[in-house]
Amino acid sequence: SENNDCAATATSGTVDIDGRFGPSPRYWKGSWPFGGGTYRVCLSFYNNWPYAEFVCSEDTFSIMPSATISVPSEVEFGSEIVVSFTNLAAASTNWIGIYDVDDDPAVSSDTLFWSSMCGSQEDWVEPECPAQSAGSVTFAATDPDLEADEQWPPSPGARKVCLMYDDYEPIICENFIIKELPAGTTSSSTITTSKSSYDYSETISATFSVPVAIQNSWIGVYRAEDADNTMGSIPEPLGWVYAACNNVAGDQSETKNCAATATSGTVDIDGRFGPSPRYWKGSWPFGGGTYRVCLSFYWNTPNTKFVCSDNTFSIAPMAP
């Protein structure tokens, strides 16, 4: 009782190593339960350091992880991301987040996308979403809204998806790659306006053709000097519409995303959405000057996946 020594002896027997002594028993270097991995047991003949008199099992044993998360190692740009999970110690406050691969969720709040374990940002915690021991969540352009710091589609590059506790502490993460647009996509794309000059407040029509249809692709109007194909990225447009939806509200009620896709079509940029539509940097009607239209394959910054018209167009100034 005083020194907690074991005065008994045994030449054979069986012992159990488990959680009956609590999560952090006396002199344990680790804590219970041990994480998933490969292990070995050893017997030592005394407890003084260094432990020079011992014997270890020749065989190893494995412990299954308490939680797993899986995602395809590579995801095509613009494709949905399906995340599967298991969690033996599931809680209703668990959630799933997508991050840049170098971000540490424990110290960074730069969550690109996130979801409850039930697949939305609304039914989080009980009773709407009780603890989930296994399942999957799909990130896509369609509702429900799972966006955070990025809009769909995610920017290409190295990412990781993490199963999280109720705060920003990850339980387990898995790395994956969002692939770049297929080679030649931007160089094979075209966009042009229907006219080389427009009257003040006249509808601007732009026709586009792309080899790959991507959700949320959009077409924007710029002053001619602010955007062209020689630039590595383009800024926010003065005005824009989704390429496939020809509007700024999309076809999804929660995200206002445009989940529809189109490889060609014509859009109209005009005043039908009011003088200051959603995310317009400018206001309608644009002033007199020289302009250019560009098509972007996503909204996230830096905006590097785009094609601009080689030709400019003019808008006449407002009549006095």
Image (cartoon, grey):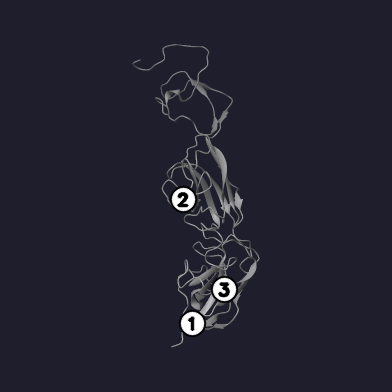
Hey, which quadrant is residue 79 in on the image?
bottom right
Q: Which mark is residue 235?
A: none
Q: Mark 2 = which residue?
A: 103
Q: Mark 1 = which residue?
A: 289
Residue 228 at what x, y percent from top left? 54, 74
Q: Which numbered disc flags the more N-terminal residue, 2 or 1? A: 2
Find the distance from the CA under tag 3 to the CA under tag 2.
Answer: 40 Å
- Of circles 3 and 1, which is in front? 3
Residue 292 at what x, y percent from top left? 54, 76
> Is the residue under label 1 in contact with that under label 3 (CB below 8 Å)?
no
Q: Quadrant of the N terminus?
A: top left
Q: Nearer the viewer, residue 180 or 12?
A: 180
Outermost left residue? 2
Residue 172 at what x, y percent from top left? 50, 41
Q: Mark 3 = which residue?
A: 268
- Kind of element beneath mark 2: loop
